[in-house]
Image: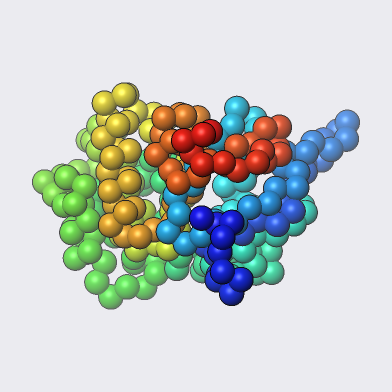
Amino acid sequence: MADSLPADAVPALRAEGLGKRVPLPGGELTILDGVDFTIAKGETVAVVGASGSGKSTLLSLLAGLDLPTAGRVELDGAVLSALDEDGRARVRGDKVGFVFQNFQLLPSLTALENVMLPLELRGDADAETPARAILGQVGLGERLGHYPRQLSGGEQQRVALARAFVTRPALLFADEPTGNLDTGNGQAIVELLFRLNAEAGTTLVLVTHDERLAARCDRVLRLQAGRLLAPMPAAQA
């Protein structure tokens, strides 16, 4: 899909010559080297690779959480390295949602308050109504007042999904979203993630070691020792 973008189309994401190196006492460690790809709006793309291949670093660069040592990232037309930290934070707040392996819910906030938080940070006048609505969509309408410690792992990830989608992001990054869940809960979260994503028309970038999960996406980007192998349809990956 991305390879046939019209010349004047603005992609959801573009990485050009992306590299990341970190200094070590004995020299320099190359984590990513010469990574190039384009992701069209509405695509679902899996990033796979062995441990240490650079998946998490790539996700951090794509989201503007870290800056590359070479190349650049364009997120919906914005060159992230041309923005200061506040500018990158604004782009994330306006356009990006996140789902993490370890949920990253605030333990002192209820499920409802965790989902309201990104709307409040954005300055929305009414954060509670959409937060209640999406928690109902993920099956937690009766658990609004529960704290993370009172929820199972699967329920916590449902809250995290609700928090990610409540801002109606253009782009969703999911980093091993089923990594801390058993098979049954993991499958339920996968089905919910793809349903919410399809309903919202969001662009999804999914980091996973699970080949079956990767095969649910439109394309697979495969990293090996910091380099991107030739992209291919998920069914052939």
Tell me which residue sits at (17%, 45%) in the image: 140
Residue 30: x %, y % from top left: 78, 38
Tell me if 96 is positioned left or right of 7 in this view: left
167 shown above or below 224: below
Instruction: Judge whether residue 99 can be spotted in this image.
Output: yes
Count of numbered circles in the view: 0
Examine the image and state in which quarter residue 47 appears. top right
* Color scheme of the displayed model: rainbow
Tell me if 191 is positioned left or right of 176 in this view: left
Residue 155: x %, y % from top left: 25, 38
Residue 204: x %, y % from top left: 44, 51
Tell me if 8 is positioned left or right of 145 in this view: right
Tell me if 141 is positioned left or right of 180 in this view: left
Tell me which residue sits at (19%, 65%) in the image: 129
Front-lying residue, 96 or 24: 96
Front-lying residue, 73 or 98: 73
Tell me which residue sits at (34%, 53%) in the image: 197
Examine the image and state in which quarter residue 84 appears. bottom right
Instruction: Judge whether residue 176 can be spotted in this image.
Output: no
23 shown above or below 203: above
Residue 71: x %, y % from top left: 75, 57
17 shown above or below 214: below
Direction right: furthest residue:
26
Examine the image and state in which quarter residue 78 appears. bottom right
Front-lying residue, 220 or 197: 220
Tell me which residue sits at (55%, 57%) in the image: 2
